[in-house]
Amino acid sequence: CWWDGDFSVNCSSTGISAVPEALSQTAVMADLSYNSIKRFTCADGGSGDWMLKHLNLSDNLISELSLTTCTNLPLLETLNLNGNAIQALTLGPPTPPEDGQVDGLLPALKVLSLERNHLNRVPRGLGLLQSLQTLRLASNGVRQLGLSDFQNCSQLKDIDLQNNKLTEIHPAAFRDLSKLQVVDLRENALATPLPQILISLNFFRLEVALSDNAW
């Protein structure tokens, strides 16, 4: 790995198979892309809080991932997991605890990118990421959008589900997303020309992409 200035570390295409234990907790940006990393837990690289704001783990070999213990990344804003082999992503229970406390689960995360993985459903518990604004799930195998998939995602603005296998969208799937601006549903298997849910949303300046579906 090499440093670009004092706060950016680049380990891309270095052949590593694990997150370096000596990865400095002072780094603000870390690029670990194009390697052979099979496992990532938030405790990797040492204990204590990290200063990371941008973490790139794209194009590795990660197949399963749990973010339930991510209490040491309080400043992380973007997490790029594109191009892995993730079949399941665990965030926690689908709804926050009754007291509303989320125990520090990535409180600053705004962008979660999971394009080109092996997901067959939307990750459970997205509502625990209370700052999440952009969710990228393009080129997976998601088949349906359920009632609670985006529950409590009050800040969500942009959802990219292009090139999945969507055949069904629950009528209330986007009900609570008052800040939603973009929904990309291109290249799916939707048989209804315009899902009723998107007609009923009636959000100001909502952009919906629906080309290349089953109709």
Image (cartoon, grey):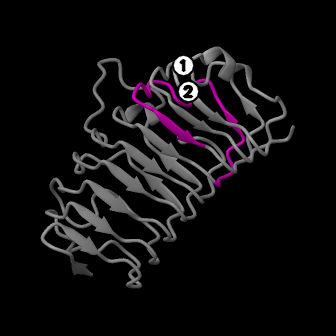
Q: Nearer the viewer, residue 18 or 10?
A: 10
- Where residue 159 appears, as percent x and y from the top left, is 54, 39
Asked if residue 124 shows in the view, the reply is no
Q: Nearer the viewer, residue 28 or 37?
A: 28
Residue 10 magenta:
no
Q: Secondary structure at mark 1?
A: loop
Identify the main secondary structure in magenta: loop
* Residue 204 in the image: above or below residue 16: above
Q: Nearer the viewer, residue 73 or 205?
A: 205
Asked if residue 48 shows in the view, the reply is yes
What residue is rendered at 27% in x and 81% in y? 1
Q: Residues within 10 Å of mark 2 (few under 14, many from 20)?
A: some
> Does 14 sit left or right of 196 as displayed?
left
Q: What's the magenta region?
A: 139-160
- Where residue 203 appears, as percent x and y from the top left, is 54, 19
Question: Tags 1 and 2 in contact by the CB under 8 Å rule?
Answer: yes
Gap between marks 1 and 2, in whole Å? Answer: 5 Å
Q: Of the residues shown, which amino acid type is indicated by label 1? A: Phe
Q: Which residue is mark 2?
A: 206
Q: Of the residues shown, which amino acid type is indicated by label 2? A: Leu
Q: Which residue is mark 1?
A: 203
* Residue 134 in the image: above or below residue 195: below
